[in-house]
Amino acid sequence: MINKKIIENVLYAALSTGGDFAEIFVEDKYTTNMKMIGGILEDSISGRDYGVGIRIFNGFNSIYAYTNDSTEENLIKVAKEAALAINLDKKNIVLNLMKNDVKNNNKIITLPRSVEKAKKIEIMKNGYLSAKNYDEVISQVTVSYLDEEQNVLIANSEGLMAEDKRVRTRMAIQSVATKSGEMQIGFSAPGASMGFEFYENMDIEEHGREASRIAKTMIDAEFCPSGKMPVVIHNGFGGVLFHEACGHGLEATSVAKNTSVFSNKLNEKVASSVVTAIDDGTIPNEWGTTNIDDEGTPTRENLLIENGILKGYLVDKLNGRRMDYEPTGSSRRQSYKLPPTSRMNNTYIANGKSTFEEIISNTESGLFAKKLGGGSVNPATGDFNFAVMEGYLIENGKITKPVRGATLIGNGTEVLDKIDMVGNNLKLAQGMCGSVSGLVPVNVGQPTIRVKNLTVGGRKGDE
Amino acid sequence: MEYNSIIEKIFESGKDSLEEMEVFIENGKEIEIDVFEGELNKYNIAESGGLSLRGISNGKMGYSYTEKIDESSIDLIINDVIENSKYIDSPDKEEIFSGSSKYGEVELYNEDLSNVSLEKKIDFVKALEKEALSLDERVVSVSGCSYGEVEQHRILRNTKGVDLEEKKNIAYCYISVVVKYNEDIKTGSSYIISNDFSDYDYKSLAEEAVEEGLSMLDAKSIESGNYPIIFRNDVFANVLETFVPIFSAENVQKGLSLLKDRIDSEIASPILTLSDDPFIKNGVASRAFDDEGMASKFKKVIDKGTLKTYFHNWKTAKKDGVSSTGNGYRGSYKSSLSIAPTNLYVESGKDSFEDLIKSIDHGLLIIDVQGLHSGANAVSGDYSLSAYGYEIEGGKIKRPVNQITIAGNFYDTLKNVEKVGNDLKFVLPGIGGQVGSPSVKIKSLSVSGE
């Protein structure tokens, strides 16, 4: 993308005022976005993102600069400007860039750029039709299509030089059900780190029907009751519970500054003993998988919690300095416009021993959250919230009627302690996670779990 | 960077294959300063931009963009526009606009900001952190303390004669603190957005964040039930922002808003007026022209409870047989044309903030809600949000409350506004436009706690 000699010159310029580490991140990304509303293709836009980010460390502090102009002259100018923020004696750093071999976790067969738009639109149309024809209560269906090919080159003053190609494909189907002046939505959005072959091995129509099934179920649902109750959270996207309640608090971004509830708790019990949690950036072709992170460190499997004991954090180079902790291959960023920091990749609660049926039949009464929407957390206090997209009451150990409009709130450390049953049906689901270094694709995941009691916010008074 | 020659070359190269063309360029400079434990922890600088081409081929609009703005990109973006236009099958034609006859004037750029030295700005952020840490011994850390500046330049030029550009600058400062007493941890934050550096006062920013954090210590939940609610100004603005899509004509036309056929009918309390003003001096979302070259306009969306208009771009206006409200919007050069407000706000009422509190015998003042991106549905209007604030008893603030959710439906909430305060505040800008509100009192909402 940029030749080695230029990179060396830029890194030397970045180190010219006494910085102790310099890094260059080059990104060249092709993106296609399309939107179909009511079966009609309304929008189609494609383009090329191109830019370079330069980062310099001085102890625990960092400087970041980016530009779209990748001529050697401009890059050296930008590096020098950034370096002005440091005013020390130049350190004796000799560059010896060595091209790193990168292990390929994501084998790509058909690059999306090589596929005609007509073929992509045909799949969108199939998704639309399956959703629209599901039931007459479905009043509108929106299908969004995304593919991207992100090529990155990362080099730093430690001699690292690595390249990676990240290909991602996703389709999102949203169905709206309308009845008596009310609307409810359902959603299904499969994605993978794959090329166009993603659609060969999956049934997009199943996702269309799924989105409509949820919308139809929810338009007929009553309001959810409020109060504290046992909550069974289903596998797949239910993993957003762990992602919000715990995952963000394990990112070095807040751990390093001692502003996380999990700071200084390694090897302490932070969860119920049935909880084991892992972040794994290497699972082949998964949505949150990359070969190397955005600092060039190979991704890996990171054990976070084992049988309730805190075993590890997710750490990037800069925060690793403050924490005296080796980087874990977890440093990510949305684009060259943001410096990277520690983030999740594919994060999940590992399988336990209970079956789904056992969990439900052992719950006298409560809420079954079959599908969750998104959520958020305050890492300092651990207070989290997330929305239930599809919920049901559990009465006498059985799933009964659907309920809508529920939100689950709680505190991260408390909820981890209250997980008392973990199923054996682990499933991953795709999401976009937003934080300081922008939006990045992640998988969340878990088997079905039960939380002893959790505050459920609904619109129907206490029952 | 000089763009005239590249725009001319694009128009020249595309003229045989495209009927009309428009170039949209955004470029800018950014600075971000972050202080931690008295040191310049982060210093980010950027200078970047991108160019989008949209054009009509066989009567249909295609889009493409590039951040590599040089001659090597010209053929690629023209071909992409043709390829992207091919499959558009919307019966509502998107067109390129020939320009308004007159454009209003608005001040957007404050020269003085760049005359304040970088050192002075860094010192300000350092002083802010130091002040927050010194205010109370229960302040255990400052989790975020930063200052940022954005300078934006927008250029719109097309083959129908539109040739417009606008330059603006924005600056902001933000602090968030962590307070701890015994094992209880709470956070507080505050911010300012202004391109006039003389507005910046580190003492009041630090005090606001610290006071908010301390006031929440020892917060507990409350019994579930229905309570009258005051949304503090910034909270109501954030909730309103989430539901802005219901006012978009595009969503109305696509069946994604329940405001269809409601123009001139009462959709809100008669004391509620919602205005969109693109001419606020140095307003974050102020602009003289929208992203398709239409002159910006002031409008009342809701006038004393009655829905007066949707937000339109040219395409949706044509479909409804009305004129565009000048709300054509592109999130960036990477986005196609959509719709967004400019500076949208609930007009101030008569009551002071204290009057609102005095009017409640037993209820809640909400000072923060979380999970707006997930717990609120802009299609159905339903929301159920994690919240915190204070319990009000006998017209006075009694104690802090957390671990609750408040739930309702936004369409009902608009009707249930009982009082509107006189403390209008704009919140940090989200995607498209900036939203403001005074504090408002809602008759009753469902609260879930213990």
Image (cartoon, coloured by chain):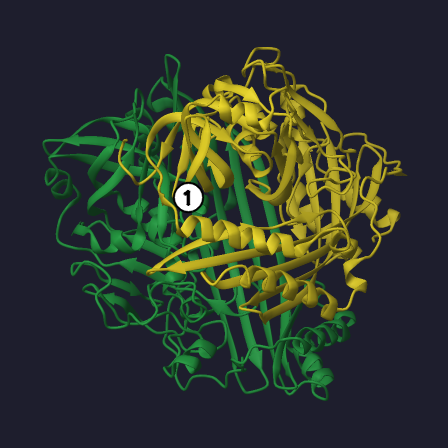
Chain colours: A yellow, B green
Residue A56 appears left or right of B273: right
Which residue occupies 73% across, 31% down?
A: A329
Q: Position of residue B409 (x, y in %)?
A: 31, 50
Foreground pick, B102 / A302: A302
Q: Quadrant of the C terminus of chain A?
A: top left
* Residue topped by disc 1: B375
Query: Could you tell me which residue is drawn at 76 percent across and 34 percent down?
Result: A282
Residue B139, by quadrant, is top left
At which x and y percent is residue A174? 53, 56
- Camera-side residue: A100 or B1? A100
Residue B172 or residue B15, whichever sits in front: B15
Q: What residue is shown at x 66% (from left), y 75% (from top)?
A: B87
- Would you say residue B198 is visible in this rendering? no
Q: Would residue A278 be found to the left or right of residue B220 on screen?
A: right
Quadrant of res B173: top left
Image x and y of residue A258, in percent:
52, 21
- Secondary structure of the residue carrying tag 1 is helix
The type of residue carrying mark 1 is Gly
Chain for disc number 1: B
- The answer to whether residue B167 of the structure is visible from this angle is yes
